[in-house]
Structures are given as structure tokens and as C-alpha cells.
Amino acid sequence: MKLATFTEGHTTRVGVVKGDHVHDLASVGGLPTDMIALLSGGPAVMEAIRPAVDEARRIPLSAVHLEAPVLNPRKFLAIGGNYEAHLQEVRDFMPRPEHQTWFNKQVTCVNGPYDPIHLPRVSNTLDYECELAMVIGRRGRHVRGAATRAMIAGFTICNDVSVREWQRRAQTQMLGKSFDTHGPLGPWIVTPDELPNAHTLSLKTWVNGELRQSDNTSGLLYKFEEMIEELSAVFTLEPGDILSTGSPAGVGGARKPPVYLKVGDVVRIEIEGIGHIEDRVVPEP
């Protein structure tokens, strides 16, 4: 299934996307109307959704505004240096990590799949990063082995927008990763049954129609299961948590000289089996 959060009129709710329509789950009684509640319901709710989809009201996608699939995640984390080619392109200013290196993106950076991203007032070192993101579907601590797969509700696209100047201010990287609007997600969550090849998906980024990034998730240095094992050893993962799995090579900040995003640029990120997100750069209001 493709699980989406959308706004029609002044009401935001969840639905299942099929073709060019979204099936409004709010039109079927007894089902959650927000994504975290839906995911928290576990397998029982997911199974209840499947037959309900055919009964639900169908709305053309052109008549709704797609939001980030999870509007208010409790956690939004991303791993750095998870593709070998990306490690090579940033080796002059980022040492090779010995372990998984995670950083926090403040949840206020969450942005819709087609909403504008802000060029900050305080820096012009704005960059893009194409990433496949996992969405957690159940609570878990110290999850290991095959049990890690059951933690994944699905996958979505993330643009790990980065302000390089601020990213380098501290080893945590958090400030440069957390500006408002700098976490576009979407356009929906694709459940694992529809992405059995999640470890071999192509990823591509275009800026103004120019291909900048092109790779495959087969290049991930740490696989999904290893990431969940690492994080859940420290804290409880919860439904709706976003775990972004790393960017391939081709970022603007690693070019010589660097080529940063400017007002008017359009960034399109496409991941096989999911779809695409597309965001235009605008001045910070």
C-alpha cells in the first residue's frame, strides 16, 4: 500500500493512494485519521485498511495537497557517510567514521513533498541530499536479527537538506540539518510488501533538470537491519519515527568549487518503486 497524509479543503487526514486517486480512510468508520495513530494500531489496523480501501471515498490526487506522510514524528534521524562514493567525495572535510554516525534533524524541519524549501537568511551554503527513509511502525528496544524487519512500516523519500556552513559548526551536525522546511518527505509511505527489493532501488537527484546524483541502495554500507539494531540498543523506537539512510555521491558542497542551491532552483528526487518529490528554493520569509 501507499499510505499518504493529505489535505482537502481545511481538513488533513490519511488515505491510501491507488493510481491517480487517494482513498479517504476517514470516510470509513473506525479507522485512524492521522498517520501515527494508524501505524500505532499495528498489523490489526493495517489488515483492516485493506478491505476498507474499496469502500472509501476516492479523491483525485489533483484535488488534494499531499503533506509529509508523518507530520509530527517523535524522532527524525539520519545517518551520515553511508555510501562509499559519498565518503570519498567529502574526505577532505569529513573524516571516515568508525561506527554508524547518526544526527538529529529537529522535527520542525519536516516539509511536504512538493512544498518550497527556504534559503536561510544566515547562509547561502544550501545543499541537497537524496535519501531513502525508513518509517518505523512499532515500538521496540534492543531489536535484533529478523525482528528488525517487523519494525519497518514502510519507506519514503527524504531530501536531507543541509546548510553546510552551519553543519560544520559542531560534530553533532544538528544545526545545519534542522532549518525549518529542510526535511521534505513523501510523497507517501510504501509498505514493505510492495518494496521487496528495498536494498536494490535506484536513487536520482536532478537540480533544474541536471542529473546530480545517481546510485542504488545496494551501495548502503549499513543495511536497514543494522541501523535498527544500532539505534534500538540505545533508545526505544516508536511508530512514526523517521530514519533516513544516507546520501549517495553528487552533493553540491563536494564539487570543486562548491555549487550551492539558490533561489529559484528546483530539486527533484526520485526513488524507484516510490515516486518522486520536488521542491523549489525560495527566500526565507
Image (tube, rainbow, N blue to C red):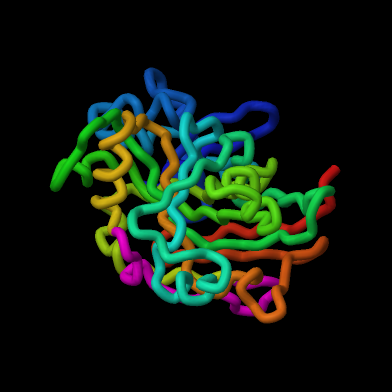
Q: Is residue 248 above or below residue 131?
A: below
- Residue at (34%, 65%) from the top-left corner? 220
The residue nearer to you, when weighing 268 against 176, is 176
Residue at the image point whose x is 48% and y is 71% from the top: 86
Q: Position of residue 128 (x, y in %)?
A: 62, 62
Asked whether residue 216 is drawn in magenta, I would say yes
Q: Is residue 62 above or below residue 276?
A: above
Q: Is residue 92 found left or right of 40 in the rendered image?
A: right
Quadrant of the rendering where the C terminus is positioned? top right
Q: Position of residue 83 (x, y in %)?
A: 40, 68
Residue 42 percent location from the top left of the image? 27, 29
Image-based side of 222 in relation to 275, left or right: left
Decide which of 167, 11 is in the foreground and name it.
167
Within the image, what quadrant is residue 92 found in? bottom right
User: Please, which residue is most extreme toward the top here?
Assistant: 30
The stretch of residues the image draws in magenta is 206-222
Question: Is residue 62 something that shows in the picture?
Answer: no
Q: Is residue 19 magenta?
A: no
Say if residue 28 shows up in the picture.
yes
Please tell me which residue is depicted at 67% across the width and 81% down the height of the picture.
256
User: In which quadrant of the rendered view does residue 108 lie?
Assistant: top right
Task: Report the residue at 44% width, 74% height from top.
Answer: 215
Figure quadrant of residue 207: bottom right
105 vs 29, left or right, is: right
Q: Residue furthest left?
A: 146
- Pick whichever, 240 or 234, lies toward us: 234
